[in-house]
Image (cartoon, grey):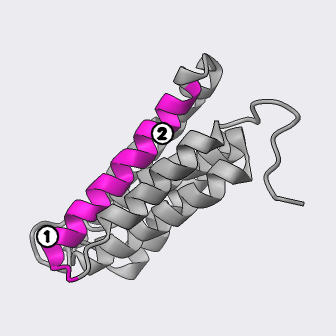
Amino acid sequence: MSRFAIPAIAATLLFATPARADEDDWATASDIGRGVLVVTALGLPAVQGDWKGTKQAAFSLGATYAVTSGLKLVVEEERPDESNDKSFPSGHTSSSYAAAATLHKRHGWEVGVPAHIVATFVGAARVKADKHFVHDVIAGAVIGEAAGWLLTSRKNDKVQWVPW
């Protein structure tokens, strides 16, 4: 389980982080990070035949999408790059944190900690890409984290959320 997830997440951190990045590079890196997390959250349980875990990940991501989209419609905050008025909250960050929290709660800290590192990178990259303000990213993280923890259960009693 974690022997495949950790190298995939580590590869994302190594290869998706541009050395000299402009806004487009940061946006691309955040797209890749989010994609890896969402695919891992849905795919890891599916590969293991854990359909309950796949269903919980889908509900977590779906609820996050609904809340995030609803807030974007209501708040209408202009993005830092002035491209539109859908800045608050960060959808990339909320879906990344929903995936990370689902992986953490379902599979334990060995998968959850690296997933949260990638989710944090995604949020930082959205700010560096000039697509979000810091408060957009923080709100997205809270929404995703809440959905992941509230809508996911442990895979079994052997799952540890912390290493001790």
Q: Check disc 2 and report the residue beneath it.
A: 40
- Amino acid at dot 2: Thr
Residue 145 is inside the magenta segment: no
Q: Position of residue 86 (x, y in %)?
A: 23, 62
Q: Which residues are magenta?
A: 20-45
| Amino acid type, callout 1 | Asp
* Image quarter of the N terminus: top right
- Point out the image quarter for the C terminus: bottom right
Q: Residue 59: tell me if it is visible.
A: no
Residue 136 in the image, given as x and y percentages of width and height: 38, 72
Q: Residues within 10 Å of mark 1 (few under 14, many from 20)?
A: few
Horizontal arrangement in the rendering, residue 101 relative to residue 15 (left or right):
right
Answer above or below: position of 128 versus 69.
below
Q: Position of residue 68 (x, y in %)?
A: 39, 52
Where residue 28 sits, quadrant-wise, is bottom left
Which element is circle 1 on?
helix
